[in-house]
Each structure stands twice: as structure tokens, then as C-alpha cells.
Amino acid sequence: MRRLLLALPFALLPLAIAHAADEHDHGSLGAHVHGVARLDMALDGRTLEIELDTPAMNIVGFEHPATTDADKMKLALARETLLKPHGLFSIPEAAGCTVSKQKLESPLFGHEGDDHNDGDTDEHEHEHSEIHGHYQFTCSVAAVLNKLDLTQLFKSFPATQTIQVQLVTPKRQMGAEVRPSNPVVKF
Ligand SMILES: [Zn+2]
């Protein structure tokens, strides 16, 4: 995925670099703005890959560890929605895509091999929390895929106002800013 993104036009590179650096330093790059999410999509042969990075605020309305029952419930429901990527990303049935890999990561979900704190207790790391979803599909009729429709994602998580999309397909590489009023990117 990242290898593919390196082929993007120069104007999009800062976002890709911020994306890579983000794994080590959540929040402090200023890339995390509430209401704004990032989505990278790559279609390569029969493989469709989607990475979603979003402030937890957009998904559950808070970024602190869930302590109350209400918070835990919100988190569980969000997780359930995020683990149904066909619906979330409106993947057409005709494309015959099956999920070959999916992974959710967030400090809010507890430690899932994502302990990036190198013994350094930096308080800033706890001010913001992101949710990261990584999905990989194998599609038997990939030619059917000609658009990315984020309608359901905006509906499921209405605190999301903008999604910065980067996509790479055999036909094109492009970036787009997607909003609820215009949730489809054709490619
Ligand atoms: Zn935040």
C-alpha cells in the first residue's frame, strides 16, 4: 500500500509522509483535525486495499479510554460497524469482493500489538486518539469497481465532515476531498 502511494503526484506526498510518521507520533503533526478523516485506497489486479485513519472523535465522540458503560457501548457498536466493510464502503456485490484481511487499531481498543511508547511518557500521546482500519479484499470481478462511495461511512459516523481520499488504480492516481453532500469518487 505505502509502496503504491509513493507513486502519487508530488502535491500529495506530504499527506503520505504524515501518514507514515503518524504511526510513531499521534496527533502532534497537526494532521489530526476533528471532523477530518483520511482514506487511502489501492486497487491492484484483484486486490482492493483500503486504509482508514480517523480521529476517534469522529467515530465515538470521545478520545479518552472508555470507562463508563455508555462509552464502552459506543465503542463496541462502532467496532461492529467498522468490521463490516462491505456496507461501510458500499462495495458492489457484483465485484465479488471477499475480505482477505481486516484489522482495527486504536488506543481505545486496548493494546493490540500497537504499543509505540518507547518508555517515554509523553503526555501529548494521550490527548488525541485515532482509529485506524486496514482492509484487504480479493475481488473476482474487479472491473466492476469504478467508484468509491462513502455515503454509508458518513451516515454511520455523522461527526465526520470531510474525508481526504487518495486512490491508486490501474487507470488513475488521484486525491479528493469528499463530503457528505458529495460522497462519491469515480475512478
Ligand atoms: Zn483528537
Image: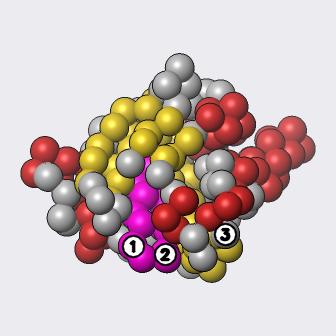
Classify residue 106 by image quadrant: bottom right
Q: Residue furthest top?
A: 181
- Residue 137 appears in the rendering: no
Residue 62 versus residue 17: which sits nearer the camera? 17
The correct choice, above or below, for 164 with respect to 19 in the image is above
Q: Residue furthest left?
A: 10
Q: Measuring 56% from the left and 53% from the top, which residue is drawn there?
A: 131
Q: Which residues are magenta?
A: 38-51
Mark 1 = which residue? Answer: 44
Per the image, label 2 sits on a secondary structure element best described as strand
Mark 2 = which residue? Answer: 47
The correct choice, above or below, for 74 with respect to 112 in the image is above
**Which marked residue is nearer to the observer: mark 3 or mark 2?**
3
The correct choice, above or below, for 176 with respect to 42 in the image is above
Residue 111 versus residue 39: which sits nearer the camera? 39
Task: Classify the position of the N terminus by image quarter.
Answer: bottom left
Q: Are marks 2 and 1 in contact (CB under 8 Å)?
A: yes
Across and down, in percent, residue 83 comes to 72, 60
- Residue 174 appears in the rendering: yes
Across and down, in percent, residue 59 comes to 64, 40
Q: Amino acid at mark 3?
A: Gly
- In the shown orientation, is residue 26 left or right of residue 113? left
Q: Earlier in the sequence, mark 1 or mark 3?
A: 1
Q: Which mark is residue 96?
A: 3
